[in-house]
Amino acid sequence: MTDPDTPDQTPNARPAERLDRQFDALERDIPRLRRFIRYLRSNRARPVRVPLGLLLIFGGVFSFLPVLGIWMLPLGLMVLALDLPFLQGPVAALMLRTRRLATRWSRKSGR
């Protein structure tokens, strides 16, 4: 029998929670994208997420072209991680490391 006050013990519960926290932080850090991020995280966007994620990854592969860039690759992985549980842990860790690195850079530059 499980206690209702304990967190979910399924193997993917923790990575999913970590990913949710990182997306929450992203919404706070970039207020202009808040509505778009919330839409992508909603169930209404489920049919859009996988094709969008794959297109972003595909565009990241062609980063040598002017408009497309390597920035599209992690963005595509972030979008795909919303629907693919095996990506949630690594993507949440990548998002956390990136945010920490950005914080360190901004402190060094005096902003």
Image (cartoon, helix red, strand yellow):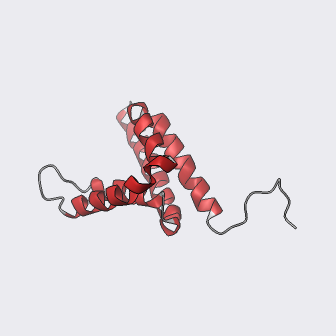
Q: Give the residue drawn at x 51%, y 50%.
A: 43
Q: Give the residue drawn at x 38%, y 60%.
A: 50
Query: In the figure, residue 10 lies in which quadrant?
Result: bottom right
Q: Nearer the viewer, residue 5 or 30?
A: 5
Residue 14 placement (x, y as % from top left): 63, 60
Is residue 15 found left or right of 35 in the rendered image? right
Residue 5 placement (x, y as % from top left): 83, 53
Q: Nearer the viewer, residue 101 or 81?
A: 81
- Total numbered circles: 0
Task: Name the image quarter holding the C terminus.
Answer: top left
- Can you say whether 29 is above or below 83 in the image? above
Query: In the figure, residue 34 lies in which quadrant?
Result: top left
Residue 80 placement (x, y as % from top left): 41, 60
Q: Give the residue drawn at x 50%, y 46%.
A: 42
Q: Nearer the viewer, residue 103 or 83?
A: 83
Task: Name the image quarter holding the N terminus.
Answer: bottom right
Residue 51 placement (x, y as % from top left): 33, 59
